[in-house]
Amino acid sequence: MLDEKCREFLIAHVSFWEHLTETEKERLLNSTSAVCYKKGTLVHGGNEDCIGILLVRTGQFRTYLMSEDGREITLYRLFKGDVCILSASCVLEAITFDVYIDAEEDTEALLIDAAAFRDLARQNIYVQNFGYQITTSNFSDVMWAMQQILFMGADKRLAIFLIDESSKNETDTISMTHEQIARLIGSAREVVSRMLKYFETEGMVKLSRGSVTITDRKKLRKLTQ
């Protein structure tokens, strides 16, 4: 049973709530649970793992692909209020590739049971449309990630990442290691370290242990154009 705060959070973040019947509302509430994941936890482990729809309350998830040799390509990250439907692969029959989801931080989320969501979507067009909208949004993020990896140089991808991360957190300092940044932009740590050192010599950033501080945003932004 969801507590009042979780119930209010769910209602505020599913656009179809007002279009549900009382029976459907009860089904949704009874099929949603509050879950907590420690940093580093594998939340969703591939196409055969259908845990349900994830709605982030606090923390952060990372969605990624993994090659046979263990190389990871980050597709997108999920923050407070974000919804991920790829964790319910059994709801999306067209999804045949393995997607993995990790908790990048200690994370609290609401988990809507996959079977319940599928049943609601079949009987209520508003739930179905919500699912389509989230899927479209998730795949838009995937395509942006693929565009960066396939068509942008490492310097441009890194510059975009630093500016976006700085804007999102409203600080010039990005508290991440080179290894973490490399994983998030789909590159090698050695490449990221080399590019960051170049950025530093050009006066765009200042490097410290476990962090990168933007010192010339205007110059860094030119690399993204």
Image: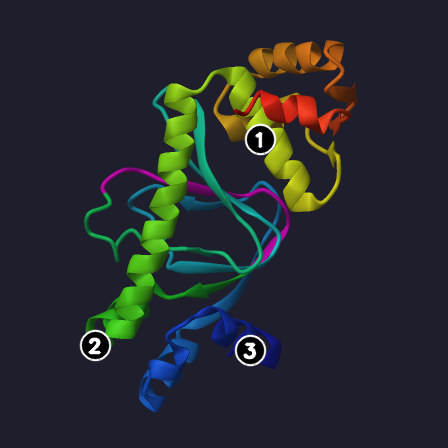
**CA separation, marks 1 and 3?**
33 Å
Total of numbered circles in the picture?
Answer: 3
Residue named by callout 2: 123
Locate residue 56, reporting x and y percent: 53, 58
Q: Residues within 10 Å of mark 1 (few under 14, many from 20)?
A: some
Residue 205 higher or lower than 94, as above or below = above
Position of residue 107 in the picture relative to residue 89 (left or right): right
Q: Amino acid at mark 1?
A: Phe
The residue positioned farthest toward the bottom in the image shown: 22
Question: Is residue 41 within the magenta segment?
Answer: no
* Mark sitting earlier along the chain (1/2): 2
Residue 8 shows which numbered tag?
3
Q: Is residue 35 visible?
A: yes
| Nearest-to-viewer mark from 1 and 3 | 1
Quarter where residue 23 is shown: bottom left
Residue 161 shows which numbered tag?
1
- Residue visible at 50% across and 19% down? 187
Helix, strand or loop for disc 1? helix
Locate residue 15, reporting x and y percent: 41, 72
Quarter where residue 201 is shown: top right
Report if the CB atoms under discs 1 and 2 are less than 8 Å apart: no
Per the rendered image, the range of residues in magenta is: 96-108
Q: Amino acid at mark 3?
A: Glu
